[in-house]
Image (cartoon, grey):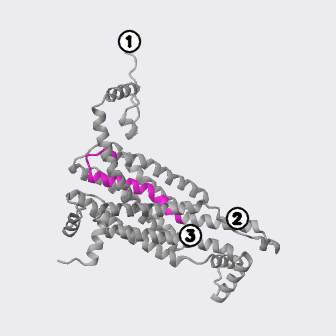
């Protein structure tokens, strides 16, 4: 029975967002294609099919985000003209002819060359987004050639994050010339500062979704690898290590927003997002140990579901904030959200490809260590630290109060 496009899309979305290898399995067509490409093991086929789904969904999300960003974009001169019109006549919408006339005034006053610096940087950012989408499509279409698909996703990750970072280091305002404005009595330094602020906001909107997606992408990748190899403890450790970093980053954001003047919806949304990684910390003792396949449903799945509920609540509160208080155009908020989700999935698949060989290296080194003379030295060092109460895992992960030391015996 032939599947419709809707059926295929539903299956790919489910694979990408569920990311649980108890439920992710390659279909017959994929197994045939993978077998023809010398990928014969069923578990390896399931992993390749999951990579295909993540790459496709990430490509679609990033493509939609890029399309909305293109629609939302307007030249720098027009943006400044709107800002000037809003300052002169607050709440009054200018006609197209009036806005065009004011745009010409802005170009004459500031200089077209200076405005082109901002427009060219925006064009570069759009080109990077399109390139990432193309690379992800190539990775998804060529999923059966796993090595090539891995290279495509890695290049996409480097392009998505590395090129905008390199571009943001360049002091673009240094190439702007305001001497003509200063000869007319204008304040060129003030305009240079204003353009620097504009470029800073533009870079923040470009890099923000990518940087914000790194930590949740790594954590989600680690938990996904835990469902693929439940006997391994390293994926659980990665989740526990990155969870406080992510929670701290979000908590810092809450502190900054509260000082700027955030309200309940905004602060509540970020507080709920902070609670999600704290769920992993609360259950750290369960995550960092090896599991059987049966334990995945009762341990890992329940922990992920609780964290997902907190994330969903946080996103819902943030959406209410954007819609209710009109702090950001809905179009802008939409493409930023799509880009953030797409970059989370891109980070997931790239770090999963990295974690797998690291797990093999860790396993081989552990076996070699157990048979070496270093084991006795290491155990002796642990015994010294343990005698001082420094190795109490229950206290470290469950935040239990230390037991009181035994007092002297009562007098007879």
Q: Is residue 168 above or below residue 405?
A: below
Q: Which residue is mark 1?
A: 411
- Mark 2: few, some, or many residues within 10 Å (few <14, many ≥20)? few
Helix, strand or loop status at disc 1: loop
Q: For mark 3, does the 10 Å Cα neighbourhood hold few (<14), some (14 to 19), or many (20 or more) residues?
A: few
Where's residue 398, x and y in %? 37, 40
Q: Residue furthest left?
A: 1
Identify the element where label 3 is drawn: loop
Q: CA distance from mark 1 to mark 2?
A: 78 Å
In front: label 1 or label 2: 2
Would you name the residue on which mark 3 appears? 327
- Residue 100 image offset from top left, x and y in percent: 66, 85
Label for residue 193?
2
The first of marks 2 and 3 along the sequence is 2
Q: Is residue 146 above or below residue 332?
A: above
Q: Is residue 230 magenta?
A: yes
């Amino acid at each position: 029975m032939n599947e419709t496009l809707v059926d295929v899309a539903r299956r790919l979305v489910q694979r990408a967002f569920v990311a649980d290898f108890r439920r992710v399995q390659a279909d017959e067509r994929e197994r045939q294609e993978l077998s023809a490409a010398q990928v014969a093991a069923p578990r390896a086929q399931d992993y390749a099919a999951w990579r295909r789904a993540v790459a496709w969904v990430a490509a679609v999300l990033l493509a939609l985000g890029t399309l909305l960003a293109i629609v939302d974009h307007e030249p720098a001169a027009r943006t400044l003209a709107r800002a000037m019109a809003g300052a002169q006549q607050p709440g009054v919408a200018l006609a197209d002819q009036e806005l065009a006339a004011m745009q010409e005034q802005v170009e004459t006053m500031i200089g077209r060359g200076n405005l082109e610096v901002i427009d060219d940087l925006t064009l570069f950012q759009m080109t990077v987004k399109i390139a990432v989408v193309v690379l992800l499509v190539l990775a998804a279409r060529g999923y059966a050639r796993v090595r090539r698909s891995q290279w495509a996703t890695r290049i996409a990750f480097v392009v998505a994050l590395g090129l905008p970072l390199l571009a943001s280091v360049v002091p673009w305002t240094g190439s702007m010339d305001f001497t003509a404005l200063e000869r007319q009595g204008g304040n060129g330094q003030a305009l240079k500062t204003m353009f620097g602020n504009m470029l800073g906001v533009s870079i923040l909107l470009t890099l923000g979704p990518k940087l914000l997606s790194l930590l949740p992408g790594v954590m989600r990748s680690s938990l996904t690898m835990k469902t693929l190899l439940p006997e391994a403890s390293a994926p659980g450790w990665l989740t526990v290590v990155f969870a406080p970093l992510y929670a701290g980053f979000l908590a810092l954001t809450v502190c900054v927003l509260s000082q700027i003047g955030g309200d309940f919806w905004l602060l509540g949304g970020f507080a709920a997002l902070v609670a999600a990684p704290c769920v992993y910390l609360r259950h750290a003792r369960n995550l960092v140990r090896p599991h059987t396949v049966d334990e995945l449903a009762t341990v890992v799945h329940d922990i992920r579901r609780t964290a997902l509920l907190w994330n969903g609540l946080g996103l819902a509160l943030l959406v209410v904030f954007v819609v209710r208080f009109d702090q950001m155009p809905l179009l802008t908020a939409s493409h930023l959200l799509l880009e953030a989700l797409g970059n989370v999935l891109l980070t997931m698949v790239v770090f999963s490809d990295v974690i797998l060989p690291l797990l093999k290296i860790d396993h081989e080194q552990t076996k070699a260590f157990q048979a070496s003379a270093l084991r006795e030295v290491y155990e002796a060092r642990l015994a010294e630290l343990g005698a001082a109460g420094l190795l109490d895992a229950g206290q470290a992960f469950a935040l239990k109060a230390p037991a009181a030391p035994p007092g002297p015996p009562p007098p007879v």
